[in-house]
Image (cartoon, rainbow, N blue to C red):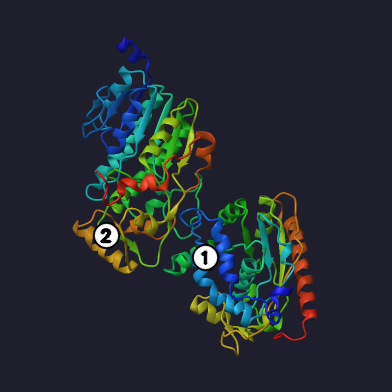
Amino acid sequence: MASQRKKQKPTIVLTGVNGRFGRMLARALHRDYRLIGVDPRGARRLPRDVTVHTIDLRRKKVEDIFRRNRIDAVIHLNPTPEWRGRTSEHRNIAVLGTQKLFSYCAKYQVPKAILLSSAALYGAHPDNDQFLTEAAPLMAGSGFATMRDLVEVDMFATSFFWKTPEVDTVILRPVHIVGDLNNGVSLYFKQKRVPTLLGFDPMVQVISPEDVVRSVVLALKPGLRGVFNIVGPAPLPLTQLIRMTGRRPFPVPEAVARSLIGIGFGVGATGVPSAQLDYLKYVCMVNSDAARDQLRFKARMSIEETMAPLERRRPG
Amino acid sequence: MPNVDPHNKVDTRNEVEVAINRLLKHQKEHGYDPFGFRPSTLRRALPPVHALYRHYFRVQVEGIENVPAGRALLIANHSGQIPLDAMMIATAMLIENEPPRVTRAMIERWIATLPFVSMFFSRVGQVIGTRANAQALLERDELLMVFPEGSRGISKPYSQAYQLEEFGLGFMRLALQTNTPIVPIGVVGAEEQIPALWNAKWLARMLKMPAFPISPTLLVPLPVKYRIYFGEPLVFEGDSDDEDRVIRARVDVVTDAIRGLLKRGLDERTNPFF
């Protein structure tokens, strides 16, 4: 009986399933879908009914998954950049892996492909509109290679969207995801002293992983395709968000910050390149009207609920 | 307008406090709007501006009731070397309009790169000047102030006082696109605050400044009397992407309205200082 019902469930291939966000997404989906996880890191603490393949996306074996199963959707979590180290390797994983994965979608007639990208790819610039639409160019790449790879992945998916109309491609560009995650933004807020740039306090949009999970679930709707900015609660100034976590902003003059980070990045003391400082200086916020109208997505978590997992002393 | 005349002994000491408190009543829980405006910063920044408004420039306002509720574009002549005219219009909207309203102005993009300055401008309600930002503000039914003469207007020498420079077309396209009424404004008095004999353009270019006025007052404004005339709102209809020629004809209507207000102001006054 149970196995019969299992067969009726649509099948989803989920990449990056072993990341904290991947696990959250798997837990949200596994009751309604048969999940096949792909992650070179293997899998821990996943629901038992999730099949996991511990392989690199570039490997030929990934194609076997598509050959042997009728896949109803692919959800590709854009790999979180490792700022340091083997960037050419990272580039390979991010860009080539994505290309392979999407080519299988076309070849095996997968009706839906979802890429979880990021609104940070628009880049923080002094002449940004306060709220960028999906039509804005992805300008984050100029500073450093890792970000450029993520831009390339997003642009590849966008061109796939146009070239392959038979696959309903959805590209989600959520704002900074904060919570119990190991991504750069969450780690930034979790520092003992949270550095800001003296004299700058841009408005910042954040979103909880729970809300992003909901947007992915909505994107699975058959027939829906497009590029969507995903926005959480109303924006607040950066320093205000830091204070909400029970920490205090630690303003540093920009020149000092840039040279310290430059040296630190060079010797390996920090994993953040100084180009990232632009996000502490200029706005990089997005308009989410398209997500509201077509995806019917609206964030449910308040700003307090979104920031709560980052609080310094959490009860329990 | 009895309450704008300081000789009438109207209590003007608390008007800043009253206006800000009324703004705060409508604010969101965290005290910031999505553009970074925070009324409590304005509360701290306003008193010196208010002192200029009441005691130095003794601003006299007429026709402020012409500003409609909801979205509107305030279009004014620009003069006086430093943009005190913008500050005075914004202060008028805050303390003389019913209800108090925040005026949004668009600031130059390079200002966003300046520490503290960029933060301050954003907290008092100013927004980086992009077309999308202007549109977003009007769609939120805000009040947007535009000087279509731009820096050409503000930096012209005294010999061209009260002659309007050519207006840009952007504001008209914006008004048509967002269905926004235009309130023409004539500012009389600002032309005399820093009478510039000459704009040293080569010096400005060398120093990378928009203008370099040579003035006997050395950029210290004289205690002129400001007279701000708000004209009746003008509503335009049509295609915002129309040819320049068509848009220009509509812009001329606004220019003429402002010219009329300036003429009236100049006729009514006997002296730039009183």
Same chain for the residues at labels 1 and 2, yes or no?
Answer: no
Residue sitting nearer the eye, A106 or B76: B76
Q: What percent of the width, then of the height, locates residue B223?
A: 63, 85
Q: What percent of the width, then of the height, locates residue B95?
A: 63, 68
Reply above or below: A135 against A192: above
Contact? badges 1 and 2 (CB < 8 Å): no
Q: Residue furthest top?
A: A1
Q: Amino acid at mark 2?
A: Arg
Q: Which residue is mark 1?
A: B124
Question: In the image, is A261 to the left or to the right of A204?
Answer: left
Mark 1 falls on what kind of element?
loop
Residue sitting nearer the eye, A188 or A37: A188
Residue sitting nearer the eye, A135 or B124: B124
Residue sitting nearer the eye, A50 or B93: B93
Reply above or below: B58 against B130: below
Q: Quadrant of residue B267?
A: bottom right
Residue at 45 percent of width and 41 percent of height:
A230
Question: In the image, is A75 to the left or to the right of A47?
Answer: right
Quadrant of the frame with the N terminus of chain A:
top left
The subunit carrying tag 2 is A
Q: Quadrant of residue B226?
A: bottom right
Quadrant of the frame with the C terminus of chain A:
top left
Q: Residues within 10 Å of mark 1 (few under 14, many from 20)?
A: many
Q: Residues within 10 Å of mark 2 (few under 14, many from 20)?
A: some
Q: What percent of the width, then of the height, locates residue B251?
A: 73, 61
Question: In the image, is B133 to the left or to the right of A213?
Answer: right
Residue at 39 percent of width and 51 percent of height:
A140
The subunit carrying tag 1 is B
Residue A193 bears which disc, if any?
2
Q: Is residue B110 visible?
A: no
Mark 2 falls on what kind of element?
loop
Q: What percent of the width, then of the height, locates residue B87?
A: 60, 72
